[in-house]
Image (tube, helix red, strand yellow):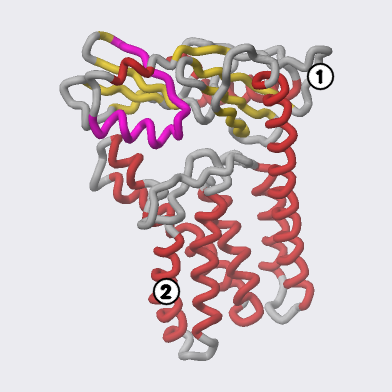
Amino acid sequence: MDSLTQIVLGAAVGEMTMGRKIGNKAQLFGAIAGTIPDLDIILNFIFPDDLSKILIHRSYSHALLTHVLLAIPLAWWCFIKYKRQFAFNNWYKLWFLGLSTHALLDACTTYGTRLFLPFTDYQVGLNNISVIDPMYTFPFMGLLMVCLFKRRDDPNRRKWAKLSIYVSSAYMLLTFGVKWYVHEKFNTAWVKNQNEKIDYLYTSPTFFNNALWAGIATNDSFLMIGEYSVFEEENSSGSIEMVKYKRNLHLEKGFEGKGIETLKWFSQGKYILEMKDSNKLMVYITKWGRSDFSQTAPEKAFVFYYEIDKSHPDEIKAIQPEFNGDLMKQALSQLWRRIWSKEI
């Protein structure tokens, strides 16, 4: 998830593990622990190509085995810094939980997190919460900040810390419930009512909220995508509008290499192909759903897509829009309207 949310979660871990012992510094150490896994972005300066960026992010820095091992020197440093005043196990708990909860929270999003490297590169993505969800972050942060204004031996300090954990955890559980509800809506509207066979159905929240969801259904020939909001009015047929795309999987021929294989793995099967010309293949990653609900053309509907040149099949080129204030304002306005109505 976004950096602010990870800082808040890490600070909460620090507060719960060492808040009574070292006060506000516990939140500081926890926030640092919650930030460390995302420092893999520094490697983008060393490996600036788009293929490496995909392979590096949320890989070993987010692996649970890495956290088991990395927490040892970090805990030992704190143990020595505080002159062995507090047990090593306490410090280890702070750093390990601060690191690992970062990865576990990321695993709830759509991007995919390789928790079990080096044993498998499987991307864990539960798709129950957006990478940015203010309804999760801000109540969590507000309740936790109360602790900063109370003495470390104040019993109410721990009560506020626990309340922040309870509220954020309750919201997280709610997102799983919403996902189940929405998934059933898509399953009824698409899978059960389609003459055409659908092999897989995916559901994922759109950005900044947990009310509007994208549904993505695939088979070998087509990919179907649509949106459903828990606040929109039900129609009598219970149908959900879909946009249907040919996947064009046959276009992979001639582009075999590390580029297409990486994108197929990264997309987790949610991609479509188009030829730009005889030498360039466009790969549209659809697992986040459409970024513009008024558009159906792939290059306008999806934010993230890539180009592969036949002469360099082991390389990819990211094609992304240049975001500016007006474009972001327009996107958020459209998102807000679509949450409450199908009219955008």
Badge 1, how many Cα within 10 Å: few under 14, some, many 20+? few
Number of labels in the image equals: 2
Dot 1 lies on which element? Answer: loop
* First along the sequence among labels 2 and 1: 2
Q: Which residues are magenta?
A: 257-276
Nearer to the camera, 238 or 50: 238
* Percent x, y of residue 77: 41, 79
As drawn, 9 above or below 269: below
Q: Which quarter of the figure is the C terminus placed in? A: top right
* Percent x, y of residue 144: 68, 61
Residue type (three-letter) at the residue carrying disc 2: Leu
Q: Residue at x 51, y 61 (%)?
A: 100
Q: Residue at x 61, y 19 (%)?
A: 226
As drawn, 269 above or below 156: above
Residue type (three-letter) at the residue carrying disc 1: Glu
Q: Is residue 176 visible?
A: yes
Dot 2 lies on which element? Answer: helix
Q: Quadrant of residue 242?
A: top right
Residue 329 magenta: no
* Percent x, y of residue 332: 61, 26
Q: Which mark is residue 176?
A: none
**Left or right: where 233 falls relative to 223:** right
Instruction: Check disc 1 and report the residue beneath it.
Output: 233
Residue 270 magenta: yes
Q: Is residue 322 visible?
A: no
Nearer to the camera, 38 or 26: 38
Instruction: Check disc 2 and report the residue beneath it.
Output: 74
Disc 2 + disc 1, Cβ < 8 Å: no
* Percent x, y of residue 215: 61, 25
Badge 2, how many Cα within 10 Å: few under 14, some, many 20+? some
